[in-house]
Image (cartoon, helix red, strand yellow):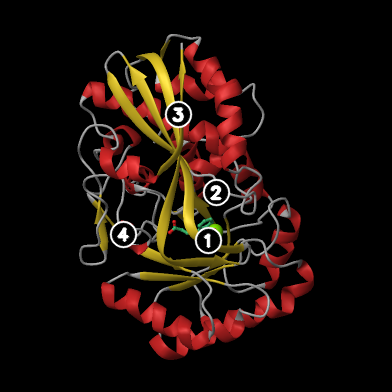
Protein backbone atom coordinates (compact mmCIF):
# COMPACT_ATOMS: atom_id res chain seq x y z
CA UNK A 1 0.00 0.00 0.00
CA UNK A 2 1.92 3.08 -1.14
CA UNK A 3 1.34 6.32 0.76
CA UNK A 4 -2.29 7.04 -0.12
CA UNK A 5 -2.64 10.66 0.96
CA UNK A 6 0.52 12.81 0.81
CA UNK A 7 1.39 15.20 3.63
CA UNK A 8 1.27 18.99 3.29
CA UNK A 9 4.51 20.85 2.62
CA UNK A 10 6.22 22.88 5.35
CA UNK A 11 8.25 26.09 5.23
CA UNK A 12 11.58 25.24 6.83
CA UNK A 13 13.31 27.93 8.91
CA UNK A 14 16.11 25.96 10.53
CA UNK A 15 17.19 22.50 11.52
CA UNK A 16 18.69 21.79 14.93
CA UNK A 17 20.85 18.76 15.67
CA UNK A 18 21.79 17.44 19.09
CA UNK A 19 24.16 14.67 20.04
CA UNK A 20 22.72 12.81 23.01
CA UNK A 21 24.37 10.36 25.38
CA UNK A 22 21.79 8.24 27.17
CA UNK A 23 23.02 5.78 29.80
CA UNK A 24 21.76 2.22 29.19
CA UNK A 25 20.13 0.34 32.07
CA UNK A 26 22.55 -2.53 31.37
CA UNK A 27 25.43 -3.02 28.91
CA UNK A 28 24.36 -4.20 25.44
CA UNK A 29 26.80 -6.65 23.82
CA UNK A 30 26.67 -7.82 20.22
CA UNK A 31 29.19 -9.61 18.01
CA UNK A 32 30.61 -6.17 17.18
CA UNK A 33 31.04 -4.74 20.67
CA UNK A 34 29.60 -3.58 24.01
CA UNK A 35 27.73 -0.32 24.60
CA UNK A 36 26.98 1.18 28.00
CA UNK A 37 25.81 4.56 26.71
CA UNK A 38 23.61 5.14 23.66
CA UNK A 39 25.08 7.99 21.64
CA UNK A 40 22.50 9.19 19.12
CA UNK A 41 21.49 12.33 17.22
CA UNK A 42 18.12 14.04 17.54
CA UNK A 43 16.85 16.35 14.79
CA UNK A 44 14.43 19.25 15.23
CA UNK A 45 12.93 20.75 12.07
CA UNK A 46 11.75 24.32 12.75
CA UNK A 47 8.98 25.42 10.41
CA UNK A 48 6.58 28.34 10.24
CA UNK A 49 3.87 25.88 11.42
CA UNK A 50 5.84 24.47 14.34
CA UNK A 51 8.53 21.93 15.10
CA UNK A 52 9.02 18.33 14.02
CA UNK A 53 11.31 15.70 15.55
CA UNK A 54 13.45 12.94 14.10
CA UNK A 55 16.27 10.66 15.22
CA UNK A 56 19.47 9.69 13.41
CA UNK A 57 20.17 6.17 14.64
CA UNK A 58 23.90 6.09 14.01
CA UNK A 59 26.07 4.78 16.83
CA UNK A 60 29.34 6.10 18.26
CA UNK A 61 31.52 3.97 15.96
CA UNK A 62 31.05 2.47 12.47
CA UNK A 63 30.67 -1.14 13.67
CA UNK A 64 27.10 -2.02 12.64
CA UNK A 65 27.20 0.08 9.48
CA UNK A 66 29.66 2.51 7.89
CA UNK A 67 27.80 5.48 9.41
CA UNK A 68 28.60 6.84 12.89
CA UNK A 69 27.75 9.86 15.03
CA UNK A 70 30.27 12.25 13.59
CA UNK A 71 29.86 11.16 9.98
CA UNK A 72 26.16 11.96 10.29
CA UNK A 73 26.86 15.16 12.25
CA UNK A 74 29.20 16.35 9.50
CA UNK A 75 27.29 15.32 6.38
CA UNK A 76 24.02 16.67 7.76
CA UNK A 77 25.43 20.14 8.45
CA UNK A 78 27.71 20.36 5.45
CA UNK A 79 25.42 18.96 2.72
CA UNK A 80 22.02 17.54 3.65
CA UNK A 81 20.50 20.35 5.69
CA UNK A 82 21.72 23.19 3.40
CA UNK A 83 20.22 21.37 0.39
CA UNK A 84 16.87 21.13 2.14
CA UNK A 85 16.86 24.67 3.55
CA UNK A 86 17.66 26.12 0.12
CA UNK A 87 14.31 24.78 -1.07
CA UNK A 88 12.21 26.83 1.35
CA UNK A 89 8.97 24.86 1.24
CA UNK A 90 9.31 21.08 1.15
CA UNK A 91 6.85 18.23 1.29
CA UNK A 92 8.03 15.15 3.22
CA UNK A 93 7.76 13.07 0.05
CA UNK A 94 10.31 15.37 -1.64
CA UNK A 95 13.04 15.05 1.00
CA UNK A 96 14.60 11.80 -0.23
CA UNK A 97 14.79 13.10 -3.80
CA UNK A 98 16.45 16.35 -2.71
CA UNK A 99 19.04 14.40 -0.69
CA UNK A 100 19.52 11.62 -3.28
CA UNK A 101 22.52 13.25 -5.06
CA UNK A 102 24.53 12.72 -1.84
CA UNK A 103 25.61 9.08 -1.92
CA UNK A 104 24.92 6.89 1.10
CA UNK A 105 24.48 8.36 4.62
CA UNK A 106 21.05 6.79 4.82
CA UNK A 107 20.65 7.05 8.59
CA UNK A 108 21.42 10.77 8.47
CA UNK A 109 18.88 11.22 5.67
CA UNK A 110 16.26 9.15 7.49
CA UNK A 111 16.47 11.22 10.67
CA UNK A 112 16.10 14.47 8.78
CA UNK A 113 13.20 13.14 6.70
CA UNK A 114 11.41 12.01 9.89
CA UNK A 115 11.72 15.49 11.42
CA UNK A 116 10.19 17.09 8.31
CA UNK A 117 7.48 14.43 8.17
CA UNK A 118 6.65 14.91 11.86
CA UNK A 119 6.37 18.69 11.41
CA UNK A 120 4.10 18.29 8.37
CA UNK A 121 1.84 15.73 10.03
CA UNK A 122 1.60 17.72 13.28
CA UNK A 123 0.58 20.80 11.27
CA UNK A 124 -2.09 18.61 9.66
CA UNK A 125 -3.24 16.98 12.91
CA UNK A 126 -2.56 13.59 11.39
CA UNK A 127 -0.73 10.63 12.94
CA UNK A 128 2.30 8.91 11.40
CA UNK A 129 0.50 5.57 11.68
CA UNK A 130 -2.44 6.87 9.67
CA UNK A 131 -0.06 8.35 7.10
CA UNK A 132 2.05 5.20 6.68
CA UNK A 133 -0.97 2.89 6.50
CA UNK A 134 -1.10 1.28 9.96
CA UNK A 135 -3.87 -1.31 10.34
CA UNK A 136 -3.38 -2.19 14.04
CA UNK A 137 -3.66 -0.14 17.21
CA UNK A 138 -1.10 -2.24 19.08
CA UNK A 139 1.72 -4.53 18.08
CA UNK A 140 3.32 -7.57 19.72
CA UNK A 141 6.63 -6.73 21.36
CA UNK A 142 9.86 -8.70 21.10
CA UNK A 143 13.14 -8.06 22.86
CA UNK A 144 16.71 -8.21 21.60
CA UNK A 145 18.98 -9.70 24.27
CA UNK A 146 22.70 -8.99 24.19
CA UNK A 147 25.44 -11.56 24.72
CA UNK A 148 25.79 -12.21 28.46
CA UNK A 149 28.72 -13.38 30.62
CA UNK A 150 27.82 -17.05 30.08
CA UNK A 151 24.80 -19.20 29.09
CA UNK A 152 23.52 -19.30 32.69
CA UNK A 153 23.47 -15.50 32.85
CA UNK A 154 21.69 -15.44 29.50
CA UNK A 155 18.99 -17.77 30.84
CA UNK A 156 18.48 -15.49 33.83
CA UNK A 157 18.24 -12.37 31.65
CA UNK A 158 15.85 -14.00 29.17
CA UNK A 159 13.71 -15.24 32.08
CA UNK A 160 13.36 -11.67 33.30
CA UNK A 161 12.09 -10.46 29.93
CA UNK A 162 9.66 -13.39 29.65
CA UNK A 163 8.34 -12.50 33.12
CA UNK A 164 7.78 -8.93 31.91
CA UNK A 165 5.65 -10.34 29.09
CA UNK A 166 7.76 -10.04 25.95
CA UNK A 167 6.26 -12.41 23.39
CA UNK A 168 9.40 -13.16 21.37
CA UNK A 169 13.07 -13.41 22.32
CA UNK A 170 16.03 -12.64 20.07
CA UNK A 171 19.48 -13.50 21.33
CA UNK A 172 22.70 -12.14 19.93
CA UNK A 173 25.28 -14.73 18.89
CA UNK A 174 28.89 -14.76 17.73
CA UNK A 175 31.45 -17.51 17.02
CA UNK A 176 31.96 -19.49 20.22
CA UNK A 177 28.75 -18.10 21.75
CA UNK A 178 26.12 -19.68 19.52
CA UNK A 179 25.09 -23.32 19.92
CA UNK A 180 25.57 -23.52 23.71
CA UNK A 181 23.77 -20.21 24.34
CA UNK A 182 20.85 -21.21 22.13
CA UNK A 183 20.69 -24.68 23.69
CA UNK A 184 20.61 -23.16 27.19
CA UNK A 185 17.65 -20.91 26.33
CA UNK A 186 15.73 -23.73 24.64
CA UNK A 187 16.37 -26.07 27.55
CA UNK A 188 15.25 -23.50 30.13
CA UNK A 189 12.13 -22.18 28.39
CA UNK A 190 10.99 -24.84 25.89
CA UNK A 191 9.14 -23.82 22.74
CA UNK A 192 9.14 -20.03 23.17
CA UNK A 193 9.31 -17.93 19.96
CA UNK A 194 13.11 -17.61 19.62
CA UNK A 195 15.48 -16.23 17.00
CA UNK A 196 19.19 -15.36 16.81
CA UNK A 197 21.13 -12.41 15.40
CA UNK A 198 24.80 -12.76 14.35
CA UNK A 199 25.41 -9.19 13.14
CA UNK A 200 27.66 -10.37 10.29
CA UNK A 201 30.03 -12.35 12.55
CA UNK A 202 30.38 -15.49 10.39
CA UNK A 203 31.63 -16.61 6.97
CA UNK A 204 30.55 -19.49 4.74
CA UNK A 205 33.35 -21.53 6.34
CA UNK A 206 31.15 -21.57 9.49
CA UNK A 207 28.23 -23.22 7.67
CA UNK A 208 28.47 -26.41 9.76
CA UNK A 209 28.21 -24.47 13.03
CA UNK A 210 25.25 -22.49 11.70
CA UNK A 211 23.58 -25.71 10.49
CA UNK A 212 23.94 -27.04 14.06
CA UNK A 213 21.40 -24.35 15.05
CA UNK A 214 18.77 -26.04 12.85
CA UNK A 215 17.83 -28.42 15.66
CA UNK A 216 16.55 -25.55 17.82
CA UNK A 217 13.59 -24.69 15.56
CA UNK A 218 14.44 -21.01 15.51
CA UNK A 219 12.10 -18.53 13.86
CA UNK A 220 15.10 -17.29 11.88
CA UNK A 221 18.79 -16.50 11.89
CA UNK A 222 19.50 -12.82 11.28
CA UNK A 223 22.44 -11.57 9.20
CA UNK A 224 24.96 -14.38 9.67
CA UNK A 225 27.38 -13.03 7.01
CA UNK A 226 28.73 -9.63 5.92
CA UNK A 227 26.62 -6.77 4.58
CA UNK A 228 27.67 -7.33 0.95
CA UNK A 229 27.71 -11.17 1.06
CA UNK A 230 24.42 -11.53 -0.81
CA UNK A 231 25.46 -14.53 -2.89
CA UNK A 232 27.06 -16.25 0.13
CA UNK A 233 23.81 -15.72 2.06
CA UNK A 234 21.97 -17.48 -0.78
CA UNK A 235 24.44 -20.38 -0.63
CA UNK A 236 24.06 -20.59 3.15
CA UNK A 237 20.26 -20.30 3.03
CA UNK A 238 20.13 -23.33 0.72
CA UNK A 239 22.06 -25.33 3.36
CA UNK A 240 20.02 -24.34 6.42
CA UNK A 241 16.58 -25.36 7.56
CA UNK A 242 16.44 -22.21 9.72
CA UNK A 243 15.10 -19.28 7.63
CA UNK A 244 17.74 -16.66 6.84
CA UNK A 245 16.71 -13.06 7.60
CA UNK A 246 18.73 -10.07 6.38
CA UNK A 247 19.28 -6.88 8.38
CA UNK A 248 22.57 -5.07 7.52
CA UNK A 249 22.39 -6.13 3.82
CA UNK A 250 19.03 -4.49 3.16
CA UNK A 251 20.03 -0.87 2.63
CA UNK A 252 17.21 0.03 0.20
CA UNK A 253 14.13 -1.31 -1.56
CA UNK A 254 16.40 -2.19 -4.48
CA UNK A 255 18.70 -4.21 -2.22
CA UNK A 256 15.63 -6.04 -0.90
CA UNK A 257 14.43 -6.83 -4.42
CA UNK A 258 17.86 -8.16 -5.37
CA UNK A 259 18.27 -10.24 -2.19
CA UNK A 260 14.87 -11.86 -2.74
CA UNK A 261 15.61 -12.51 -6.44
CA UNK A 262 18.84 -14.26 -5.43
CA UNK A 263 17.08 -16.20 -2.61
CA UNK A 264 19.53 -14.78 -0.10
CA UNK A 265 16.74 -14.33 2.47
CA UNK A 266 13.23 -15.58 3.17
CA UNK A 267 12.52 -12.94 5.86
CA UNK A 268 13.51 -9.27 6.03
CA UNK A 269 14.17 -7.03 9.05
CA UNK A 270 13.06 -3.49 8.18
CA UNK A 271 14.80 -0.55 9.85
CA UNK A 272 13.88 2.90 8.58
CA UNK A 273 17.30 4.33 9.40
CA UNK A 274 19.18 1.64 7.52
CA UNK A 275 17.13 2.13 4.32
CA UNK A 276 17.15 5.94 4.36
CA UNK A 277 13.76 6.73 5.86
CA UNK A 278 10.23 5.66 6.78
CA UNK A 279 8.99 6.17 3.21
CA UNK A 280 11.64 3.81 1.81
CA UNK A 281 10.81 1.41 4.67
CA UNK A 282 7.19 1.35 3.44
CA UNK A 283 8.47 0.53 -0.06
CA UNK A 284 10.45 -2.42 1.34
CA UNK A 285 7.33 -3.52 3.20
CA UNK A 286 5.22 -3.24 0.05
CA UNK A 287 7.54 -5.25 -2.17
CA UNK A 288 7.94 -7.97 0.45
CA UNK A 289 4.18 -8.16 0.88
CA UNK A 290 3.74 -8.51 -2.88
CA UNK A 291 6.38 -11.27 -2.86
CA UNK A 292 4.78 -13.07 0.11
CA UNK A 293 7.89 -12.46 2.24
CA UNK A 294 7.27 -11.82 5.95
CA UNK A 295 8.91 -8.76 7.51
CA UNK A 296 9.44 -7.43 11.02
CA UNK A 297 10.50 -4.11 12.44
CA UNK A 298 14.05 -3.95 13.73
CA UNK A 299 15.40 -1.48 16.26
CA UNK A 300 18.49 0.67 16.90
CA UNK A 301 18.00 1.30 20.64
CA UNK A 302 15.80 4.24 19.69
CA UNK A 303 14.82 7.05 22.02
CA UNK A 304 11.11 7.74 22.40
CA UNK A 305 11.15 9.56 19.06
CA UNK A 306 12.26 6.68 16.85
CA UNK A 307 10.52 4.13 19.08
CA UNK A 308 7.13 5.82 18.54
CA UNK A 309 7.76 5.97 14.79
CA UNK A 310 8.79 2.30 14.72
CA UNK A 311 5.56 1.32 16.49
CA UNK A 312 3.61 3.09 13.73
CA UNK A 313 5.62 1.38 10.98
CA UNK A 314 5.28 -2.06 12.59
CA UNK A 315 1.49 -1.67 12.49
CA UNK A 316 1.45 -2.02 8.69
CA UNK A 317 -0.20 -5.24 7.45
CA UNK A 318 2.94 -6.96 6.11
CA UNK A 319 4.65 -6.94 9.53
CA UNK A 320 3.50 -10.47 10.30
CA UNK A 321 6.46 -11.32 12.55
CA UNK A 322 7.08 -9.82 15.98
CA UNK A 323 9.70 -7.07 15.88
CA UNK A 324 12.27 -5.52 18.21
CA UNK A 325 9.99 -2.66 19.30
CA UNK A 326 10.37 -3.15 23.04
CA UNK A 327 9.41 -0.81 25.88
CA UNK A 328 11.64 2.19 26.43
CA UNK A 329 12.62 0.93 29.91
CA UNK A 330 14.33 -2.09 28.33
CA UNK A 331 17.15 0.36 27.53
CA UNK A 332 16.55 3.64 29.39
CA UNK A 333 15.69 4.73 32.90
CA UNK A 334 14.58 8.14 31.64
CA UNK A 335 13.47 8.64 28.03
CA UNK A 336 13.38 12.04 26.31
CA UNK A 337 9.61 11.95 25.67
CA UNK A 338 6.83 12.56 28.17
CA UNK A 339 5.03 9.26 27.44
CA UNK A 340 7.59 6.57 26.63
CA UNK A 341 6.53 3.31 24.99
CA UNK A 342 5.44 0.81 27.66
CA UNK A 343 4.70 -2.92 27.60
CA UNK A 344 1.05 -3.89 28.10
CA UNK A 345 0.23 -7.59 27.98
CA UNK A 346 3.26 -8.22 25.72
CA UNK A 347 2.25 -5.46 23.30
CA UNK A 348 3.00 -1.80 22.69
CA UNK A 349 0.45 0.76 21.62
CA UNK A 350 0.69 2.56 18.30
CA UNK A 351 0.62 6.31 19.07
CA UNK A 352 -2.43 8.11 17.67
CA UNK A 353 -1.53 11.76 18.33
CA UNK A 354 -0.40 14.11 15.54
CA UNK A 355 2.93 13.25 13.88
CA UNK A 356 4.99 10.67 15.76
CA UNK A 357 2.42 11.09 18.53
CA UNK A 358 4.75 11.77 21.47
CA UNK A 359 5.89 15.02 23.08
CA UNK A 360 9.49 15.88 23.90
CA UNK A 361 10.45 16.19 27.57
CA UNK A 362 12.60 19.32 27.24
CA UNK A 363 14.34 18.88 30.61
CA UNK A 364 15.13 15.23 29.95
CA UNK A 365 16.43 16.14 26.49
CA UNK A 366 18.67 18.91 27.84
CA UNK A 367 20.03 16.60 30.52
CA UNK A 368 21.47 14.15 27.95
CA UNK A 369 22.49 16.67 25.28
CA UNK A 370 26.28 16.84 24.85
CA UNK A 371 26.46 18.88 21.64
CA UNK A 372 24.05 21.09 19.76
CA UNK A 373 24.00 23.10 16.55
CA UNK A 374 21.38 24.97 14.56
CA UNK A 375 21.63 25.40 10.78
CA UNK A 376 19.51 28.33 9.56
CA UNK A 377 18.31 29.30 6.11
O1 LIG B 1 21.25 -5.95 14.63
O2 LIG B 1 19.25 -5.57 15.18
C1 LIG B 1 20.43 -5.31 15.29
C2 LIG B 1 20.94 -2.72 18.02
C3 LIG B 1 21.90 -1.94 17.44
C4 LIG B 1 22.41 -2.27 16.21
C5 LIG B 1 21.94 -3.39 15.55
C6 LIG B 1 20.95 -4.18 16.12
C7 LIG B 1 20.47 -3.86 17.38
C8 LIG B 1 19.50 -4.66 18.12
C9 LIG B 1 18.65 -3.95 19.15
O3 LIG B 1 19.37 -5.84 17.98
C10 LIG B 1 17.26 -3.82 18.71
C11 LIG B 1 16.49 -2.86 19.59
O4 LIG B 1 16.54 -1.64 19.39
O5 LIG B 1 15.82 -3.34 20.51
MG1 LIG C 1 20.20 -7.30 13.45
For the residues labelled 1 and 4, the Cα–Cα distance comes to: 15 Å
- Find residue 345 and report its horizontal and vertical position in percent: 21, 67
The image's mark for residue 333 is 4
Question: Label 4 crowding class (10 Å Cα cut-off): few <14, some 14-19, many 20+?
Answer: few
The image's mark for residue 59 is 2
- Find residue 194 and report its horizontal and vertical position in percent: 45, 74
For the residues labelled 3 and 4, the Cα–Cα distance comes to: 28 Å
The answer to whether marks 2 and 1 mark residues whose Cβ atoms lie closer than 8 Å is: yes
Question: Label 1 crowding class (10 Å Cα cut-off): few <14, some 14-19, many 20+?
Answer: some
- Find residue 268 and report its horizontal and vertical position in percent: 53, 54
* Residue at numbered disc 3: 113
Asked if 119 appears above or below 238 in the picture, the reply is above
Q: Residue at x 40, y 84 (%)?
A: 156
- Of residues 106 and 216, the one drawn nearer to the viewer in this rendering: 106
The reply, left or right, for residue 206 in relation to residue 256 is right
- Find residue 230 and report its horizontal and vertical position in percent: 71, 53
Callout 3: SS: helix
Question: Label 2 crowding class (10 Å Cα cut-off): few <14, some 14-19, many 20+?
Answer: many
Query: Can you tell which of label 4 and label 2 is closer to the viewer?
Result: 4
The answer to whether any part of residue 360 appears in the image is no
- Of residues 304 and 172, the one drawn nearer to the viewer in this rendering: 304
The answer to whether marks 1 and 3 mark residues whose Cβ atoms lie closer than 8 Å is: no
Query: Can you tell which of label 3 and label 2 is closer to the viewer?
Result: 2
For the residues labelled 2 and 1, the Cα–Cα distance comes to: 9 Å
Amino acid sequence: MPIVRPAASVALEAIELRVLQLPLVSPFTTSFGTETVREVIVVRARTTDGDGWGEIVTQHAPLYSSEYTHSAWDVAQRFLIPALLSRGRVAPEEVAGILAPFVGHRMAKAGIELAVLDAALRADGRSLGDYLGAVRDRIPSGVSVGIQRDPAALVETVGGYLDEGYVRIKIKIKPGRDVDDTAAVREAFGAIPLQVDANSAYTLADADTLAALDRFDLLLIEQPLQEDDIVDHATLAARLRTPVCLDESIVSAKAATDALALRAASVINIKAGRVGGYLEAVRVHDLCRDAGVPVWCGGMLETGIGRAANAALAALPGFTLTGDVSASDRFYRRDIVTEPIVLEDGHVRVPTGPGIGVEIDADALDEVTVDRVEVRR
